[in-house]
Amino acid sequence: MIGRLNHVAIAVTDLAASTALYRDTLGARVSQPLPQPEHGVTVVFVELPNTKIELLEPMGAESPIAKFLERNSDGGIHHICYEVDDILAARDRLKAQGARVLGSGEPRIGAHGKPVLFLHPKDFCGTLVELEQA
Ligand code: CO
């Protein structure tokens, strides 16, 4: 059911320093910072040949990644995103198998303008999973 790895999201406390690390130390192609107030983060996209890394810096105290960074002060992998062809079919299949979908269970428009859902980390090996309709 799941397809390509769309991105790995890494929460960071200092977006400029993390961007420099990926650009200068690791030699990757990085985007400009993109504020996404509706998601409570500022994002830098790291473009790799086969996938993307998204560096997420919290925007405001209500940011969904603020608590994560309280527990992980060095930053860390926050979620991984897999592509699916049909997000509603994927959701219904997962719910039928007992997996927990976060929030209302209805897809929201994610950072790339496509419908996304998040799955409970306790149901997926301790990893927050995002599904994005390809
Ligand atoms: Co994501």
Image (spheres, helix red, strand yellow):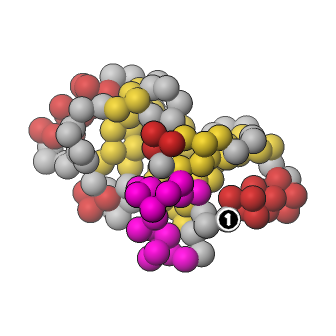
Q: Residue at x 85, y 62 (%)?
A: 25
Is residue 29 one of those drawn in magenta?
no
Q: Is mark 1 within 8 Å of ligand 1?
A: no
Q: Is residue 126 above or below residue 1?
A: below
The answer to whether 23 appears left or right of 93 in the picture is: right
Question: Quarter holding the N terminus?
Answer: top left
Which x, y percent locates residue 117?
33, 38
The magenta region covers 57-73
Q: Residues within 10 Å of mark 1 (few under 14, many from 20)?
A: some
- Tell me if residue 2 can be seen: no
Q: Position of residue 80 (x, y in %)?
A: 47, 50
Q: How many marks?
A: 1
Q: Does residue 43 appear in this view? A: yes
- Amino acid found under the numbered disc labelled 1: Asp
**Residue sitting at x 27%, y 54%:** 120
Residue assigned mark 1: 14
Relative image position of residue 14 (x, y in whole percent): 67, 65
